Amino acid sequence: MVGPYEYVEAICPGEAHHIIPDMVYRVGKAPSTEAERNSTTGRIPNAPTYNQGQAICLSPGMHRTDDDAVHKSLNPALAVLGSRHVPPRLDETGILRVLDALKGPHHVRVRP
């Protein structure tokens, strides 16, 4: 299942996960309220809102806790990429760097 985060989250029996990490699109903290999830405030120009970002449905383990969980490899890769920028964050071209970082040992495996 693939679609805007707000729709995947509503019907996913596991956890919705942004295909392109939301942190690539924002400057600052993740949104915590529904109003913030629907706002373009604090986002790079022309970026989708948190709820508009394309997402997939993952099991909770595949999302966060399994040995090969998405965030166990993704978060360290993004931290390294972000630390190389001044100011230390991903810029508007950061998504290309993220995709490069996900090649090799940081890829996401799809389970049957």
Image (spheres, rainbow, N blue to C red):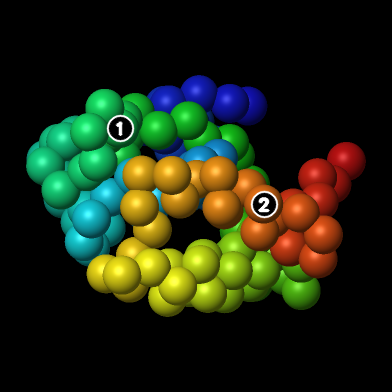
Residue at 56%, 52% (x, y): give it. Answer: 97
Where residue 88 appears, as percent x and y from the top left, is 33, 72
Q: Are marks 1 and 2 in contact (CB under 8 Å)?
A: no
Is tag 1's residue or tag 2's residue first in the polypeptide sequence? Answer: 1
Specify the amino acid type for callout 1. Ala
Identify the disc placed on residue 47. Answer: 1
Q: Which residue is mark 2?
A: 100
2 sits to left or right of 85 = right
42 sits to left or right of 89 = left
Task: Classify 43 as above or below 55.
Answer: below
Q: Is residue 50 visible?
A: yes
Identify the disc placed on residue 26. Answer: none
Provide the secondary structure element on which disc 1 rests: loop
Where residue 44 appears, as percent x and y from the top left, is 25, 41
Task: Classify 50 as above or below 60.
Answer: above
Quarter of the picture containing the C terminus is top right
Q: Mark 1 or mark 2: which is in front?
A: 2
Specify the amino acid type for callout 2. Asp
Q: Is residue 17 visible?
A: no
Residue at 40%, 33% (x, y): give it. Answer: 53
Where residue 71 appears, as percent x and y from the top left, is 58, 65
Residue at 16%, 36% (x, y): give it. Answer: 40
Residue lying farthest to the front in this orientation: 86
Quarter of the picture containing the N terminus is top right
Q: Residues within 10 Å of mark 2 (few under 14, many from 20)?
A: few
Provide the secondary structure element on which disc 2 rests: helix
Instruction: Using the numbered discs, state the Cα–Cα distance from disc 1 to disc 2 in whole angstroms.
Output: 20 Å
Where residue 27 appears, as percent x and y from the top left, is 23, 55
Residue at 22%, 43% (x, y): give it. Answer: 43
Residue 30, by quadrant, is: bottom left
